[in-house]
Amino acid sequence: MSDDLFRYVLRLADDHLVLGQRLGEWCGQAPSLEEDLALANIGLDCLGQARALYTYAGKVEGKGRDEDALAFLRPEREYCNALLVEQANRDFAWAIARQFYFSAFMLPFWRAMAKSGDDDLRAIAAKAEKEVAYHLRHSAEWVIRLGDGTEESRRRMIEALEELFIYTGELFEMDDVALAMVSEGVGVDASDLLDEWRRTVDGVLAEAHLEAPDAAYAQTGGRAGRHTEHLGHLLSELQYMQRAYPGLEW
Amino acid sequence: MGVVVAGALNPSNVRSRRAWDVAAAVPDPEIPVVTLADLGILRGVECNDDGAVIARVTPTYSGCPATRLIEQMVLEALKRDGFENVRVESVMSPAWTTDWITAEGREKLRAFGIAPPVKSSNSIRALFGETAVNCPLCDSGDTERISEFGSTPCKALYRCRTCLEPFDYFKCL
């Protein structure tokens, strides 16, 4: 039970750290000052959620690893985030599509988790749910604005939505760890959230006058540590300081 | 909220009340016109019989960078006031909500030019539900949102169409 719980919490933590890092890359680079603030703020929420989750994961594991040890000292293959969140920031539409797909999933996920039998996860979820409602609204508004905007913005929005779509299936995957957590009354059955996610996505895309993408298959593997080429580069930047100067503090 | 019990003759109750007052008066580092008590983020102050003081605070947003600073400020304020064995704990549950901002806190925010949160936070937000926010300067209801995210995690950026001034809105959470 405690090993499954550790891995379950760690996945969630990795999702949020990696996405927070991707959002942080926009700092000083976003298309407008307001968006710079927005993406950094969303990234900060993800980072805060990740910190609480890592701290809890470390406690569950019971080997003395704290949030920093889990974030900075694990290699790529030990990261178990979903592939979606590690995808690179090709352009602004790309960042928006990634956020939109993910937030549309996390909102019902945290809502369900807020009823978990696990006190720590319930507390983290109750807070995160309210934050994610803003993330979803922000990204959905941009999907509509770009999708129903100029020819160029529309082209880019469609491309991002289509190319990232194959990574969304993994969010709903239920493996042994997730199933064990559901049977313990701790975890969320992600496969139950697919309908709501699809309704959210289809509704927003309809408003943007875009067709909902479909994928013949889902690209998965992140939960087992098999990542796309993007994660290694992200981690090399994220972990550089602790790798180069172990134990450095300031 | 503090452990303030009737029959304050008990010295630990007097100390508790004093410790609560000291911690409650600490200003928010990012919006210094309001105190921690105004914002509802000071959840309790206890004095144990052995003299230890435990102050409990709750973060506003998961990633709010001010959280650590606030804990530090509470610690220092209590020590400055002569309390020695002081500990500050962070409590996650129940999650903070803008409903806990006191009436006085809301008025202070408005006077400072920040529109206070308008509605109760617990309703499940409609995806595009617009909130009607009144301008804190001229009280006009004709305002528009410029950005969902403002200068701190807890604020959004608005503009008044009547007096044309931009202003911060303290988001519902």
Image: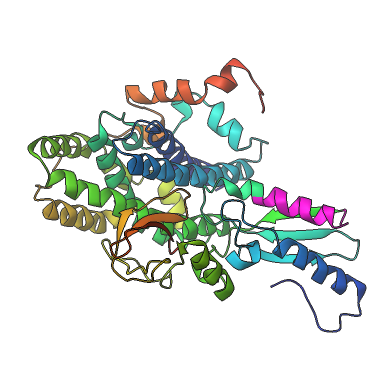
Residue situated in front as seen by the camera: B23 or B10: B23
- Identify the residue at the far top of this view: A244
Left or right of residue A162, residue A55 in this image: right
B71 falls in the magenta region: yes
Our reading of the magenta stretch's main secondary structure is helix
Task: Give residue B78's quadrant in the image.
Answer: bottom right
- The residue lying at 27 percent from left, 61 percent from top is B127
Task: Give residue B28's quadrant in the image.
Answer: bottom right
- The residue lying at 90 percent from left, 66 percent from top is B49
Q: Could you tell me if residue A188 is visible in this image?
A: no
Residue A18 image point, x, y percent = 42, 35
**Which image quarter holds the C terminus of chain A?**
top right
Task: Give residue B134's quadrant in the image.
Answer: bottom left
Q: Is residue A81 above or below residue B63?
A: above
- The residue lying at 60 percent from left, 62 percent from top is B34
Residue B30 image point, x, y percent = 57, 51
Left or right of residue A124, residue A83 in this image: left
A46 falls in the magenta region: no
Residue situated in front as seen by the camera: B172 or A22: B172
Residue B150 image point, x, y percent = 41, 50
Q: Is residue A197 above or below residue B107?
A: above
The count of marks equals 0
- Identify the residue at the far bottom of this view: B7
Residue A207 image point, x, y percent = 13, 55
Residue situated in front as seen by the camera: B137 or A101: B137
Q: Is residue A80 above or below residue A122?
A: above
The residue stretch that appears in magenta: B70-84
- The residue lying at 57 percent from left, 21 percent from top is A241
Left or right of residue B86, residue A174 in this image: left
Q: Could you tell me if residue A169 is visible in this image?
A: yes
